[in-house]
Image: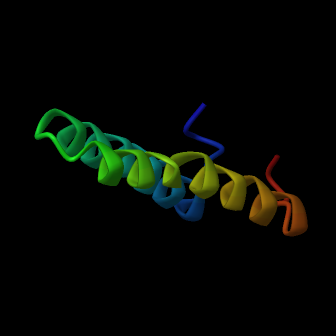
Amino acid sequence: MFKKATIADKLFLTAAILSLIYSEILFFSGEKQDATFVGLWVPSIMAFAIFFRLINPSKNV
């Protein structure tokens, strides 16, 4: 699966995972509104990853 992923794909995935982790940290520390705000970044980051993948398809896929 990751053999076909480009560096940009890995960066987007890393950003989404880090955003999810940060959101969970905020939630469990009592900052529920901030956690919800940061948690909404995850689908946005993944949507950008899909968008950039669609407008610039790699030749290896």
What residue is at 21 percent from the left and 47 percent from the top?
31
Rendered location of residue 46, percent (x, y)? 63, 50
What residue is at 85 percent from the left and 59 percent from the top?
59
- Vertical comparison of 45 with 31: above or below: below
Rendered location of residue 30, percent (x, y)? 15, 40
Q: Which colour scheme is used?
A: rainbow
Is residue 20 visible in the rendered image? The answer is yes
Q: How many labels does the image show?
A: 0
What residue is at 71 percent from the left and 53 percent from the top?
47
Query: Quick one: 33 or 15, which is closer to the camera?
Result: 33
Horizontal arrangement in the rendering, residue 41 relative to residue 20 (left or right): right
- Vertical comparison of 45 with 61: above or below: below
Is residue 14 visible in the rendered image? The answer is no
Quarter of the image that includes the N terminus: top right
Horizontal arrangement in the rendering, residue 52 relative to residue 14 (left or right): right
What residue is at 43 percent from the left and 46 percent from the top?
39
Query: Quick one: 60 or 25, which is closer to the camera?
Result: 25
- Vertical comparison of 25 with 8: above or below: above
Rendered location of residue 36, percent (x, y)? 41, 45
